[in-house]
Image: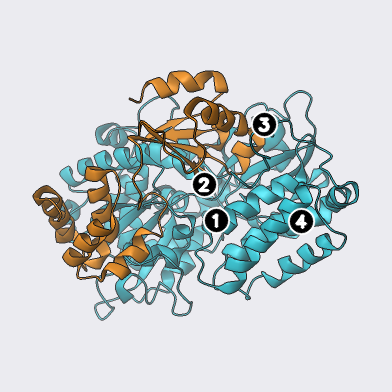
Chain colours: A orange, B cyan
Amino acid sequence: MLTEKERQEIDTELAHCATKASASVEALNIVQRHRGWVSDEAVKGIAAMLDMTPDELDAVATFYSFIFRKPVGRHVILICDSISCWVMGYHPLLDLLETRLGITFGGTTEDKRFTLLPISCLGACDRAPALMVDDDLYGPVSPEMMDEILQKYE
Amino acid sequence: MELPLTKNIHLGQPPLSLKEYEKAGGYQAVRKALAMSPLDVQNIVKASNLRGRGGAGFPTGMKWSFVPMGDKSPRPKYLIVNADEMEPGTFKDRLLLEGDPHQIIEGTIISAFAIEAEQAFIFVRWAYKLAVKRLERAIAEAYQSNYLGTNILGSGYNLELRIHGSAGRYICGEETALLNALEGKRATPRAKPPFPQVCGLFGKPTIVNNAETIANVPHIVNNGAEWFKGLSRSSDSGTKLYGVSGKVKKPGVWELPMGATMREIIEEHAGGMLDGYQFRGVIPGGASTDFLIEDHLDVKMDFDSVMKAGSRLGTATMIVLDDKTCPVGFSHNLITFFARESCGWCTPCREGLAWIGKMLQAIENGNGQLGDVEILAQQCKLLGPGNTYCALAPGAVEPLQSAIKYFGEDFQKHIREKSCPWKYEYSSAKTQRTSGEA
């Protein structure tokens, strides 16, 4: 059930890899880039290409924070909730997002625009509190900045 | 003051292109190394006394020397740059990866050559998207200029270098878990022995070095071991990236001679505490190190001095505890991170950290019981080195065991008074907010 494009991209990765299984993260990422998340069916399809059992591959897929095994919104907001961002105060940002979006950590807005998740230390501790939206890093973020940040992501 | 690691890095400006990097003296060390034997390169690094910058501080040259060498050695051998920086409070490798990718690549080439590796990886954490982009560009430039690929600069040495972008899990920074991640498996750690130097990626000899460690290598080859020792103010050699975060005036990261004191870094470079805040303590090397307090401010930030003071240098990125922040909450936030990131493989870590988290939650909420602190202290011992499959849990309990030692009275106060003396202002109307839970 993988598309031709997904298969081609996975094959390109496989050409570089010492073993098929060692392409598992790359393969999962390829499918996730196309579909937003990785379904059970996708796990089965990818596993077949990698000569892994679906179980083996799912053990990898479920291990990583950024392989999504459930659907996510068009954009993923990641608030760092580790020590420096906690000291500098990430809760006002979380409160604001909860109010603004009507969801908390783990939730997706009804219009499927945003999913909100915590993220372990972003490595931007001198710019705490920090967050990412998709691939973009923001920090230090104040509640006043949140609306302007969200506007960029339709 | 010579600061080789950051000399090409200017905040707000893009990193040097290959041509600019060469103009600034870059890739001379590769030429020098390729004209030597791999063992000679190892010897310079050994003589320099470079110690690993990932947190453990193991002598780099010695680590390399455990790799079997010569025509009969198992092939291919691998050199892996550990850029999976995820230790809370740590943001130093980001500076190097984003700021001077060619320095990382040059260090990788020389280090790989030193162990006769023909394949190298840079293992980058998920969140460092900009670093991946910049490294990809720099690697493409390096291939174009024949610093990578076959017959590098006509030397007969071949090296393929690829980036592996991780999908996000702290334990991947543990070198054996990293190997499992690269092999496409669930990234739980491996038992040691065998050590990766002998049996690593796909069972072949492998060296995993931290990105900052790797960045030092070209400078050591260029200028020699004695020069490297001369950069430092202590028995450890070279310079170090030092970071400070928390309620200080200027949080940041700076390259300084190895052995700068905590006071100098916090007061001079980070500008001291924000107005209205007092210093209470600091975890000097990232989230898995023991607290140090005001008495320790003149301790030199080198491996041996910090160990003598009762902590670890670790990543040398400090997180400051101020007087308006609750030490119980601080401890709880750290434990929550480690509990969440536990790979789940071994029982003490998987179960123990979660239970410790629950107890700290209760104490924070005013539901602690007499004797809780003693139980927590005992749990810290039970999760100590040797009792768990890897070093995650022993690291996780370092801040807690020292918080109990230095701030034990604050813990007891929570229990006696059935509330947090710091009484957080940010509990939302909807949910009771504590440091650990969403």
As displayed, is residue B296 above or below residue B206? above
Chain under callout 3 = B
The answer to which image quadrant residue B98 occupies is: top left
Question: What amino acid is labelled 2 in the image?
Answer: Ser
x, y percent for residue B413 = 88, 48
The residue mark sitting in front, 4 or 1, is 1
Give a yes or no on whether discs 2 and 3 share a subunit: no
Residue A119: numbered disc:
none
As displayed, is residue B12 above or below residue A34? above
Task: Determine which residue is flagged by label 3.
Answer: B429
Q: Within 10 Å of the Cα at label 2, are there few (<14), some (14-19), or many (20+) other Cα atoms?
A: many
x, y percent for residue A13 = 18, 56
Q: Considering only order in the chain, which callout, 1 or 4, is on the residue closer to the N terminus? A: 1
Question: What amino acid is labelled 1 in the image?
Answer: Arg
Task: Determine which residue is flagged by label 2.
Answer: A120
- The residue shown at (63%, 62%) is B353
What is the secondary structure assignment of the residue under circle 1? helix
- The residue shown at (75%, 37%) is B325
Quick check: can you spot residue A128? no
- The residue shown at (32%, 32%) is B16
The residue mark sitting in front, 4 or 3, is 3
Residue B340: numbered disc:
1
Residue B402: numbered disc:
4
Question: What amino acid is labelled 3 in the image?
Answer: Ala
The residue mark sitting in front, 1 or 2, is 1
Whether tag 1 and tag 2 are in contact, CB under 8 A, the answer is yes
